[in-house]
Image (cartoon, grey):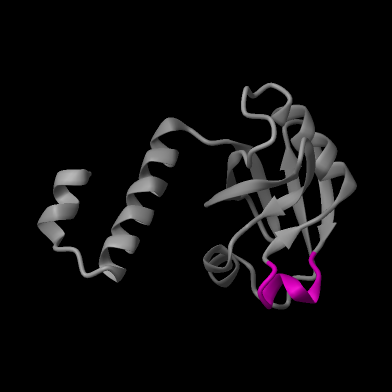
Amino acid sequence: MLVTSQCDGSRVTGLYVGADNVRRYFPKRFSRIELRLDHLRIECGLSPHFWNGRPEIHDPRLCLWLESKQAKRTERGTPMPLAMTPSGNQSFTLGPVTRDEQMNAQRAAGAHDGALNGAAEDELALVN
């Protein structure tokens, strides 16, 4: 799944998971998840708001890791796309997005937007 860092100026404040990803990958019985960040493993709590309009993960250790990754980018104050992959029961691996993953996500977003706007399928084929 594609997720993004959350930024407030140059500071990273958390991880935005998105409502669709929450519905698909996070049963409400999960109160905590394990995140695998390179060689680190951290356990992060999920607030009740996670399922009710604020699909975000906030943890100081996660933010430090995200800031270290964000510092290597030229667009430091903008959200950074990341791949979050299920890796076991209540466990996910967070890492860089491959070019293919990013292109697929953009295509899916474009197809979704086009469907909402009533665009014809052959128009989407020209864009993709």
> Which x, y percent locates residue 70?
70, 30
The location of residue 59, given as percent across then percent down, is 85, 51
Res. 111 image quadrant:
bottom left
Residue 32 included in the magenta stretch of the image: no
Residue lying furthest left? 122
Position of residue 38 measured from the top left corner of the image (x, y, whole percent) = 72, 32
Q: Is residue 40 above or below residue 108?
A: above
Residue 83 in percent (x, y) is at 56, 43
Report the residue at 78% width, 28% height from top. 68
Report the magenta residues as a range.
46-54
| Quadrant (top left/top right/bottom left/bottom right) for the C terminus | top left
Farthest residue, direction front? 9
- Examine the structure image and report whether residue 50 is included in the region drawn in magenta: yes
- Looking at this view, name the residue that lies furthest to the right: 60
Q: Residue at x 75, y 37 (%)?
A: 66
Q: How many marks overall?
A: 0
Q: Residue 127, located in which quarter of the rendered image?
A: top left
Return the residue nearer the eye: 6 or 89.
6
Horizontally, is 81 left or right of 76 in the view? left
User: Which residue is found at the position 55% from the left and 63% from the top?
Assistant: 21
Q: Quadrant of residue 100?
A: top left
Q: Is residue 15 above or below residue 51?
A: above
- The residue under the point 89% across, 46% down is 60
